Image (tube, helix red, strand yellow):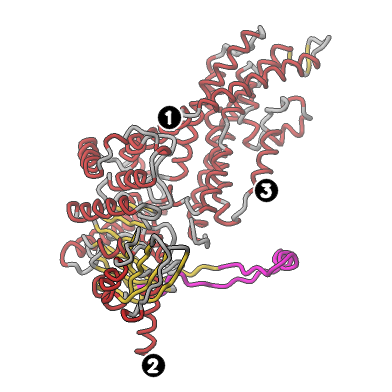
Amino acid sequence: MALCRNAKPASVVYLLYLIVRLRSTAVIRRLRKHKMRKGNEMGIIETKGLTKIYRRYQKQEGIVGSIKGLFHREYEEKAAVKEMDLCVEEGEFIGLIGPNGAGKTTLVKMLTGIIAPSSGMVNVMGYYPNKLENAFKKQYAIVMGQKSQLFFELTTGDTLNLFKEIYEIPHREYQQNKNYFVELFQVKDLMNVQVRTLSLGERMKMELIAALLHNPKVLFLDEPTIGLDAVASRQMREFLKEVNREKNTTIVLTSHYMEDIKMLCRRSVVVNHGCKIYDGDTEALFEKYQKNKRISVTFPRKVTLDLQSIGGIVLEEEGFKKVIGVPRESSSQAVAYIMKFSPMDITIEEEEIGKVVERIYEQEEAAYA
Amino acid sequence: MRKYREIAVTYLKAQLVWRADVIFNMIFTIGKIIFARILWGAIFEGKEMVAGFTYHGMMSYYIISSFLSQIEMSGGISREISDRIRNGTFSRYMVIPVKIDRYFLAMEAGVVAFYMVFDLFAAGIWIFLFRIQFVFTGELLMIVGAFMMILLGLVFMVQLNYYLGLLTLKFQEIGTFLMIKDNLAAFVTGSMIPLVLLPAEIVAVMRVFPFYYVTYLPAMLLTGRCREEMAAGLLVLSGWCILMELINRRTYEAYRLKFDGVGI
């Protein structure tokens, strides 16, 4: 009271203004959360017209161009994400796919607040991500396949201890979660091993444990299986499925690997040149646009294949190894035919994402024409 | 607060992994003392006093100031921030619920704690071996003041290097800034020569800036000199710390929004 009596009128007004401002911000957030809980009026992630434009310096070639650049620079603007509308419901497992430079990672960076949008609306769990509030950061996690949160010199246990304090996880909850994930990932023996000595697959498991320790509501995964072998990738997919099912964690997965998307995501969003070109059922997407399969096969000797009758073609050939492209519906026939030559090794892969994107585009263009 | 303590402890643990670092750092400390003994031995040849210092007083000053400059390792912060921004991994700090400047302060505390123990140990041994009559103030107020100044000085250097690192968001290349800072700091902190040897006008100008109080004045205070400058020094340094805190907050908020690189 003494403070109030001595304070100048202007500072009292300013104080009142600050209180009202803080209160109104809190009220808006509570309203948003209430809306979200009430009736899915808002998704856990929602964007409208979200756009990110980068400015790039266009340097002319050669030494003269470099000197010119000292005095005058020209910039070009590139829209990495254009007018993106997206709504993700709580508990969804959504796949974000597209070729390199499509804008997937930029979108994820805007959703996590790492970069600010140029325009448009973005709302994640009732927060504007780029404000980078701690309360927001405590509710999500991001795992990037090529970036690490672990301390390479120390053990995973040391990093987990640090994350316990950083995320202010109560001791009991920390122990429960740690035990749950250590059991799920079967990494008990690796907890006291220096991170730098772990294999890539083991390290990715540890990255996931560190990310999931604080029970995030939303998990962003950027190429989590990059560089992993088939066994490790399959394990990783199983774990993610389990986490989504058991913890109801909303997962946004960015991947180039069709297997990841097919196995995990009921819904897919295809992005190209910063625009959303498909948003819907994953099965329908592949049924409609993924026309071919790739069969890589190594023979014990030189063979000549006649694939015309099943509509297949040899895409690559090196020594006794051939990569064959066949229509999906003929893939079993093709395999049966190849087996007649007693191959030493055979791998069947889905067609790469670039082809799928190309077909979606072709179809859109045909529709407009 | 606990989270920052744990960050410091984690970085301390990370330092302890590197045994070679410990050994080389101790060798550098020893090397510096040997060099100082040879240099000042030659300067004091046939003289009792130089610029008001006895030989042992000068050696004591040198040992303290080189110890302080050795534990001031915040230069790594600007390089870490700069490298991470340029390589697109700075987001590591942005996505966790911490204040990034405090994260780096805690990180530095962990690293300094590690080097402090080993450097102190090395210095102690060599003081004993060279039979240096170590001059150290017995006045409690001066000791407390000097330690407060050391702490504020380290905080300031972390803030400065954090700021220089953040400039990468704007300029992308901060090598020139770092070079200027390093050269300036090496001279102005008084770790090369006691600033008292410089003309009074230059010293007067230096008193306005924070570097004077990072190594030089605390070393002088601990050797029982410049008592009259202590209070003003603490005030000036505190002022600089507050100013840097404000500048850093503003710089981070402004530049992270303007940053145009794809990776961060």
Residue A178, horizontal then vertical, whole percent: 25, 39
Residue B244, horizontal then vertical, whole percent: 54, 43
Question: Marks 2 and 1: same chain?
Answer: no
Residue B198, horizontal then vertical, whole percent: 77, 29
Q: Viewer-nearest of labels 1 and 3?
A: 1
Read off the chain for label 2.
A
Residues rendered magenta in the picture: A56-84
Q: Relative to A295, is B201 on the left or the right?
A: right
Q: Are marks 3 and 2 in contact (CB under 8 Å)?
A: no
* Residue sitting nearer the eye, A153 or A348: A348
Q: Which residue does the numbered mark 3 point to in the structure image? A: B176
Instruction: Indicate the amino acid at tag 3.
Output: Thr
Read off the chain for label 1.
B
* Residue sitting nearer the eye, B11 or B230: B11
> Is residue A171 positioned above or below A68 on the image?
above
> Is residue A124 positioned above or below B247 on the image?
below
Question: Marks 1 and 3: same chain?
Answer: yes
Q: Residues within 10 Å of mark 1 (few under 14, many from 20)?
A: some
Tell me the distance, in whole angstroms, between the alpha carbons under discs 2 and 1: 65 Å
Q: Is residue B30 visible?
A: yes
Q: Residues within 10 Å of mark 2 (few under 14, many from 20)?
A: few
Instruction: Indicate the amino acid at tag 2.
Output: Ala
Q: Which residue does the numbered mark 1 point to in the structure image? A: B13
Q: Earlier in the sequence, mark 1 or mark 3?
A: 1
Q: Which residue does the numbered mark 2 point to in the structure image? A: A369
In the rendered picture of this protein, how many numbered marks are placed on residues? 3
Residue found at x 35% / y 62%: A257
